[in-house]
Image: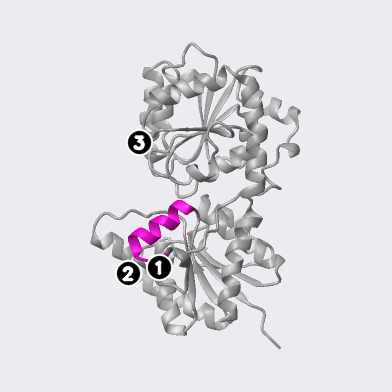
């Protein structure tokens, strides 16, 4: 009798974030395939969202120092042996180093998914990153990341499969949200009925472009709008204070809402007239663009990284140069003064992402790599 395959996924912690959500999505998919699913990570808010049959192993994988790397490797090796793990799937560099050591000790293969470029400043940084290409397979989450891996780590492009991230149609569905819910949400924020809403979803960070959007908004004071910023500040409280001071200095503080981390992001997308992703650095993939379009909300995104693959310029949204508040302001103005086009774009956006970017499609592509390993 053939044993049921068992997969151990590793990520630093189960806090909010794309890596963490990808881990949970794959765990759910594995359960549906009848495979055994295990996750090791530092506990966090998303621990409560673990699939019922997935076994969670709390490990301090969020620590990067050598002591914890070796400690975690030892613990992972024990888990591999105890639960007859078929292979390990690491989704971040710190956990990948522990997976690499555990793989050597137990003879169990491990694979990785690149969720970021991780930066390449200096030999030491690149050497640290290189653990992500030491496994049996390396998966890219976009064509942009595939090119990055091939160009910087010498992996032939034809050996790097792509599993683009996606959205969950059960969560991000405009049909699941009533007009009454949206009206109540708008009223709870004190927003007038007919005032257009701009939305930026992303943790507070310079590279997410919150400052760029605020600078753009100073050129749009003559138009009605309210801007919502959804995302936690965590260790960026000083930067958040800088952003809030900017709003006060330019007299737009009454039109800007800082929402912090939210669990109702789908409703926020549905509420918004335009979603904005003004990242100053290339997004490896960029779930924001896909999730917004899934809710029939056109997106304005910067024209680098994964956005080039997820946004159809002039059809489902707009692509603009990064670090350019003036062009962003002009694009917002153009969008807000053509509501009929916004509606058409929203419909096209939904059609586009529903055909190309769902979590089911993501998991199917990663699962195909799992099957290759099992068959070896």
Mark 1 or mark 3, whichever is nearer to me = 1
Q: Nearer the viewer, residue 22 or 337?
A: 337
Q: Is residue 88 visible?
A: yes
| Residue 243 percent coordinates (x, y) | 39, 29
Q: Position of residue 222 (x, y in %)?
A: 48, 11
Q: Residue at the spot x=39%, y=54% of the render? A: 117
Q: Residue 71's x, y, as percent?
A: 40, 74
**Which dot, 1 or 2, sits closer to the camera?**
1
Eyeballing the image, is 249 above or below 272? Answer: above
Q: Earlier in the sequence, mark 1 or mark 2?
A: 2
Q: Which residue matches tag 3?
A: 238
Residue corresponding to mark 1: 133
Q: CA separation, marks 1 and 3? A: 36 Å
Residue in the foreground of this view, choosing between 345 and 217: 345
Neighbor class of circle 1 (other Cα within 10 Å; few <14, some 14-19, many 20+) is some
Which x, y percent locates residue 26?
A: 61, 61
User: Is disc 1 placed on a helix, strand or loop?
Assistant: helix
Q: Quadrant of the C terminus?
A: bottom right
Q: Secondary structure at mark 2?
A: helix
At x 55%, y 22%, the residue is 335
Quadrant in which the N terminus appears: bottom right
Query: Which stretch appears magenta?
Result: 143-156
Give the quadrant of residue 101.
Answer: bottom left
Query: What secondary structure is the stretch in magenta mostly built from?
Result: helix
| Circles 1 and 3: CB atoms closer than 8 Å | no
The mark that comes first in sequence, 2 or 3, is 2
Quadrant in the picture for residue 349: top right
**Horizontal arrangement in the rendering, residue 144 relative to residue 119 (left or right):** right
Would residue 148 be counted in the magenta stretch? Answer: yes
Residue bearing the label numbered 2 = 66
Residue sticking out furthest to the top: 222
Left or right of residue 225: residue 170: right
């Amino acid at each position: 009798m053939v044993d049921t395959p068992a997969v151990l996924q590793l990520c630093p912690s189960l806090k909010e974030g794309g890596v963490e959500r990808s881990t949970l999505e794959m765990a759910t998919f594995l359960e549906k395939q009848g495979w055994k699913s295990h996750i090791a990570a530092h506990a966090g808010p998303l621990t409560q969202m673990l699939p019922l049959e997935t076994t969670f192993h709390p490990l301090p994988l969020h620590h990067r120092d050598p002591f914890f790397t070796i400690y975690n490797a030892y613990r992972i090796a024990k888990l591999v042996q105890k639960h007859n793990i078929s292979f390990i799937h690491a989704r971040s560099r710190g956990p990948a180093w522990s997976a690499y050591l555990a793989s050597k000790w137990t003879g169990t293969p491990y694979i990785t998914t690149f969720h970021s470029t991780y930066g390449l400043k200096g030999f030491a940084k690149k050497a640290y990153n290189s653990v992500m290409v030491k496994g049996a397979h390396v998966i890219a989450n976009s064509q942009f990341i595939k090119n990055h891996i091939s160009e910087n780590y010498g992996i032939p492009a034809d050996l790097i499969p792509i599993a683009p991230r996606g959205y969950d149609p059960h969560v991000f569905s405009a049909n699941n949200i009533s007009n009454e819910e949206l009206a109540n949400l708008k009223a709870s924020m004190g927003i007038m009925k007919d005032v257009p809403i701009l939305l930026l979803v992303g943790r507070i960070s310079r590279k997410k472009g919150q400052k760029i959007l605020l600078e753009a908004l100073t050129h749009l004071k003559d138009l009605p709008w309210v801007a919502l910023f959804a995302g936690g500040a965590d260790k960026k409280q000083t930067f958040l204070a800088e952003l809030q001071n900017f709003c006060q200095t330019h007299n737009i503080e009454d039109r800007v809402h800082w929402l912090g981390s939210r669990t109702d992001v789908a409703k926020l997308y549905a509420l918004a007239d335009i979603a904005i992703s003004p990242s100053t650095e290339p997004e490896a993939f960029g779930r924001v663009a896909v999730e917004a379009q899934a809710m029939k909300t056109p997106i304005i995104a910067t024209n680098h990284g994964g956005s080039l693959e997820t946004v159809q310029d002039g059809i489902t949204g707009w692509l603009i140069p990064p670090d350019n508040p003036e062009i962003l302001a002009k694009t917002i103005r153009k969008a807000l003064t053509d509501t009929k086009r916004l509606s058409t774009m929203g419909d096209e956006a939904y059609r586009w992402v529903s055909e190309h970017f769902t979590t089911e499609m993501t998991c199917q592509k990663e699962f195909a790599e799992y099957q290759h390993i099992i068959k070896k």
